[in-house]
Amino acid sequence: MTRSPLALATLGALLLAAGAASANPKPLPFTYPYPTLPAGETEVEQYADFTPTRALSASTGKPATLGLFLFQTEFEHGITDRLELGLYLQLAPPVGEDYAQVATIGAGTALKQRLRLRLAEAGEWPVDVSLYGEIVEARSEIELEAKVNLERRIGKMRLMANLSAEHELYFDGRREWVLNPSAGATFEVLPSFHTGLEYWMNAELPIDEKATAPRPFALGPHHYVGPAMLFNFGRVWWSFGVYFRLNDVARVQEPGDAYGHLWLRSIIGLDL
């Protein structure tokens, strides 16, 4: 019992020490904020995505409900006070050999490199703007992505939006555009706790394939919205969002669907 107060005091000291230096947290898990890391600072972020899906069991021939996971580790480094480098390792673990018609989230296992550039200091423009460019090397494709990150602060509220598009170059010759914008608002309840609401969308636009009617469900557009929260202790922070699909709400999920009725995303950040 005598060690309990000491343990609490130690934990409190660690949290205070963590707050002594501020990282660059993401209060909305799908929307990149405007700020970049200061020159010379480095941060690591661990993403985890989850969505339920359906697949066929090879042993029984019947559909089963599974969970799709996607893990991404990101290293961010401030090259200058306005230019930031990001290096990613993305891993999509398999669900098992017993299942067929299994979807994957995004590009699956991949490597990514990106730059983010702030165009002005915060508050100099009516809306703060930063630009984002990314290259993705996956097993079946190369992706080129561009984002415009917009942000406006109104007191303790932050309004954020990402205008984002990808051009996907598959090794089998296929080409397509992918639109994936996001937007939301977050409010600082306490310096260590923020809460908000976020929307994101995904739509695939094949270039070479002939248009079919009706449009395949897998191509979208898929619309998600849900609450998000941030726990910020300075050097360490955790962002979490729960999103519900707005389109095809009554549709029964089929084997191979990559966009379930529910989507979860968690990000843990550590300032090195």
Image (cartoon, rainbow, N blue to C red):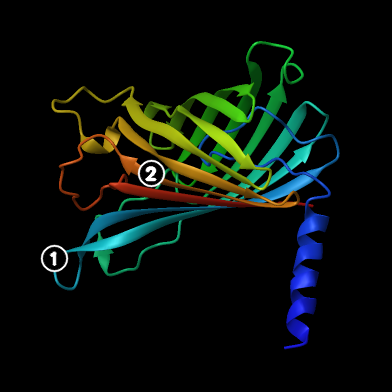
In the image, residue 264 sits, relative to residue 31, either above or below, namely: below
The picture places residue 58, in percent across and down from the top left corner, at 20, 68
The picture places residue 166, in percent across and down from the top left corner, at 47, 27
Task: Tell me which amino acid carries mark 1.
Answer: Lys
Residue 54 found in image quarter? bottom left
> Which residue bears the numbered disc 1?
62
The picture places residue 115, in percent across and down from the top left corner, at 68, 31
Let me know if residue 6 appears in the view.
yes
Q: Is residue 123 left or right of residue 240?
A: right
Q: Which of disc 1 and disc 2 is earlier in sequence?
A: 1
Q: Quadrant of the N terminus?
A: bottom right
Secondary structure beneath dot 2 equals strand
Q: Residue furthest right?
A: 40
Task: Tell me which amino acid carries mark 2.
Answer: Tyr
Let me know if residue 146 appears in the view.
no
The residue lying at 28 percent from left, 35 percent from top is: 246
Q: Residue furthest bottom?
A: 1
The residue lying at 31 percent from left, 44 percent from top is: 259
Q: Residues within 10 Å of mark 2 (few under 14, many from 20)?
A: many
Near-viewer residue (4 or 254): 4
The residue lying at 65 percent from left, 34 percent from top is: 114
In the image, residue 48 sits, relative to residue 120, either above or below, namely: below
Secondary structure beneath dot 1 equals loop
> Which residue bears the numbered disc 2?
243
Near-viewer residue (156 or 243): 156
